[in-house]
Image: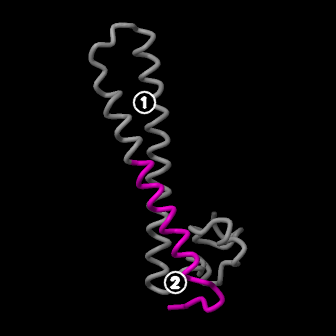
Amino acid sequence: MKKRNDLDLDKFEKILTEHKIQLEENIAQLKSELDEVGSDDGINDVEDLVSLKNLSQKDNTILEQQEKELKETLHALAKINNGTYGICEKSAKPIPVERLEIMPTARYIVGVED
């Protein structure tokens, strides 16, 4: 198992943990909104119903994206804990710090697989 000595792991762990908390809050909010849309009792106007359905589809798309992002964030945090953070999962070479600063959940070196 390779370990990155040139990274401030505490800094990346803090960034990822804060992002995880934000994503969890966003997901909870979206699920709450979807639950409200799911109970469309009392809506008699077809236009309102269509508008709600469109909002629901949009919220579902955002929810899926947020859940995927949360999964990637949890994966990156696990890599910090097991000592493999910042190592390309394909080539086992170090991921440049600049890339990790832009995308802390990066799994690969640019050009290997993105």
Where is residue 52 drawn, in percent x and y?
Answer: 42, 22
Residue 109 is labelled as: none
Tell which of 50 and 12 is nearer to you: 12
> Is 74 drawn above or below residue 67 in the view shown?
below
- Secondary structure of the residue carrying numbered label 2: loop
Q: Is residue 67 left or right of residue 36?
A: right
Task: Kindly report the secondary structure that dominates the magenta region of the rendered protein.
Answer: helix
Q: Which region shows up in magenta?
A: 1-27
From the image, tell me which residue sits under label 1. Answer: 56
Amino acid type indicated by mark 1: Ser
From the image, tell me which residue sits under label 2. Answer: 84
Where is residue 38 drawn, in percent x and y?
Answer: 31, 28
Tell me which label, 2 or 1, sits earlier in the chain.
Answer: 1
- Count of marks placed on residues: 2
The 10 Å Cα crowd at callout 1, few under 14, some 14 to 19, many 20 or more, is some
Residue 13: in magenta span: yes
Where is residue 22 drawn, in percent x and y?
Answer: 48, 56
- Secondary structure of the residue carrying numbered label 1: helix
Q: How is the image coloured?
A: one colour
Q: Is residue 80 left or right of residue 38?
A: right
> Is 4 drawn above or below residue 20 in the view shown?
below
